[in-house]
């Protein structure tokens, strides 16, 4: 083989290898948009700046005396103006800036509730710098959404809400807003994650994006490439206060229903079930005989609530509500809230190691409703019983008047009280503390430490590896699954 043929032998395969990479890359990957200019030009007129003014009353105090100056001294006027401006008895105006967007040409504007919170005056500044006074149609604290109305001389450009359920992680998005009061600013990025919970409210289900979002972007829209609003920019994660590529938007899927209700009623009307819930852990699922950790565990039921009237009990695991799968604890409040008031729905629960379907008539959420657990009278015991439960590394006692006083227990408290606990034991590891009440063991109510030992024995005889406890502490009642020791 000649030197030339050797070169061809090595070069030709490499050439075809490189070509195959280019072809596969072109076919398999979605290229970035060449420009966002056309999209931005179309959307910018519908995005507005929100300017708010609030009057802040300063605390009362004695006005400091002016220094003594010769008559006619220029310093006299200077200091008088200075003290008047900082007089504690005077009021001062505080202003802030945010973003919003128009969804109706007649003048309906959407923004965040925190942008207008406490404002005495609200102004909407259009792209052409025209300023319109705005009134609040309605606001919702829990989702941080507010609806405003302005009265334009002619119809305004507006944008439509899209379907946030269709977006995927990696899709391109465009954010437009008023960062740092600079006016209409366009940034682009991708959807970084969905379903984010940032502990800002009970209905957290944020879209995370790396499109730059800064102070002043709050209330502005997050667009898909079709020019539809699929999110309302609300929060950022930033140690410095500026964008580091972690921004959060309220999905349009949540915002749409809230906006419709705010326009119609001036407030939100949410469904109410009347339960206190908690997550289903792997250990809890195992103790209940569930194949996997799913659904929402009912920790307590409010008296005379829709749940109580519908036969839902503490210890049930809600698997489906109104034909919607309850994937986790976080799913249930959102599903219930979105359900029509007074609608009778099927609720599938896991109880007694099998599925049961009951019906509940959904109530209306009242912000002042307080969850109260239905309790039974405390079992009467002639003698106080104290027993060491080796499986859980703790000591239990029947409830006595002395213990009620010591641990500030209610008169209606039932169950057995923890009087000693091994700090390195299994119970302490799960967060149980001295003074906590154990109300149920294995979903059976207990009144003495002997009842607890009896339920442990039954569970072990049934070859269960863990057992479920209903525990009541200072923060309320909850279920805890504890591993049974091997004997």
Image: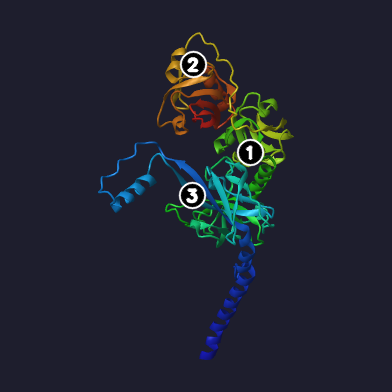
Snapshot quadrant of residue 160: bottom right
Front residue (pair 286, 348): 348
Residue at disc 3, secondary structure: strand
- Residue 120 position in % (x across, y down): 54, 44
The crowding category of the residue bearing disc 2, from other C-alpha atoms within 10 Å (few below 14, some 14 to 19, many at least 20), is many
Between 49 and 402, the residue placed more toward the observer is 49
The residue at 69%/53% (across/down) is: 106
> Residue 260 vs residue 78: left or right?
right
Indicate the quadrant containing the N terminus: top left, top right, bottom left or bottom right: bottom right
Residue position marked by numbered label 3 in the rendering: 95
Residue 246 vs residue 100, the one in the foreground: 100
State if disc 2 and disc 3 touch (CB < 8 Å).
Answer: no
Mark 3 and mark 2 lie on one chain; the one further toward the N terminus is 3
**Would you identify the image quadrant in which residue 24 lies?**
bottom right
Mark carried by residue 398: 2
Identify the image's colour scheme: rainbow, by chain, secondary structure or one colour: rainbow
Q: Closer to the observer: label 1 or label 3?
A: 3
Cα gap from disc 1 to disc 3, whole angstroms: 39 Å
Q: Earlier in the sequence, mark 1 or mark 2?
A: 1
- Residue at 70 percent of width and 39 percent of height: 339
- Residue 93 position, x and y percent, is 47, 46
Q: From mark 3 to mark 2, how far is it between C-alphas? A: 60 Å
Residue 2 seen in the figure: no
């Amino acid at each position: 083989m000649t030197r030339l043929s050797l070169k061809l032998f090595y070069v030709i395969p490499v050439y075809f290898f490189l070509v195959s990479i280019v072809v596969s890359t072109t076919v398999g990957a979605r290229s970035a948009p060449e420009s966002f200019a056309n999209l931005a030009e179309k959307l910018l007129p519908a995005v507005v700046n929100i300017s708010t003014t609030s009057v802040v009353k300063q605390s009362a105090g004695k006005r400091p005396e002016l220094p003594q100056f010769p008559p006619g001294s220029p310093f006299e006027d200077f200091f008088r103006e200075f003290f008047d401006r900082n007089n504690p008895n005077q009021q001062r105006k505080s202003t802030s800036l945010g973003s919003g967007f128009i969804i109706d040409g007649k003048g309906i504007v959407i923004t965040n509730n925190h942008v207008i919170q406490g404002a005495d005056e609200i102004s909407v500044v259009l792209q052409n710098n025209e300023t319109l006074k705005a009134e609040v149609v309605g606001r919702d604290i829990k989702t941080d959404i507010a609806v405003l109305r302005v009265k334009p001389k002619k119809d305004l450009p507006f944008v439509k809400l899209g379907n946030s359920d269709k977006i995927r992680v990696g899709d391109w998005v465009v954010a437009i807003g008023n960062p740092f009061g600079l006016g209409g600013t366009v940034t682009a990025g991708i959807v970084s994650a969905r379903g984010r919970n940032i502990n800002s409210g009970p209905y957290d289900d944020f879209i995370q994006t790396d499109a730059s979002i800064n102070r002043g972007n709050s209330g502005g829209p997050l667009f898909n490439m079709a020019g539809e609003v699929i999110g309302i920019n609300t929060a950022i994660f930033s140690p410095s206060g500026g964008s580091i590529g972690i921004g959060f938007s309220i999905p349009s899927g949540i915002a749409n229903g809230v906006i419709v209700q705010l326009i119609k009623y001036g407030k939100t009307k949410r469904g109410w079930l009347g339960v206190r819930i908690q997550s289903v852990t792997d250990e809890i699922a195992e103790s209940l005989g569930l194949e996997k950790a799913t659904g929402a565990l009912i920790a307590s039921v409010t008296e005379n609530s829709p749940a109580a009237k519908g036969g839902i009990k503490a210890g049930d695991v809600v698997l489906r509500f109104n034909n919607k799968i309850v994937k986790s604890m976080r799913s249930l409040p959102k599903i219930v809230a979105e359900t029509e008031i007074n609608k009778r729905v099927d609720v599938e629960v896991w109880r007694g190691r099998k599925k049961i379907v009951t019906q509940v008539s959904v109530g209306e959420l009242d912000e002042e409703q307080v969850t109260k657990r239905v309790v039974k009278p405390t079992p009467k015991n002639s003698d106080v019983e104290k027993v060491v439960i080796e499986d859980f590394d703790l000591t239990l006692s029947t409830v006595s008047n002395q213990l009620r006083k010591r641990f500030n227990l209610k008169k209606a408290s039932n169950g057995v009280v923890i009087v000693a606990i091994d700090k390195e034991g299994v119970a302490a590891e799960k967060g149980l503390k001295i003074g906590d009440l154990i109300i149920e063991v294995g979903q059976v109510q207990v009144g003495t430490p002997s009842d607890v030992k009896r339920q442990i024995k039954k569970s072990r005889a049934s070859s269960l590896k863990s057992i479920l406890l209903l525990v009541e502490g200072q923060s309320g009642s909850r279920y805890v699954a504890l591993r049974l020791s091997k004997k």
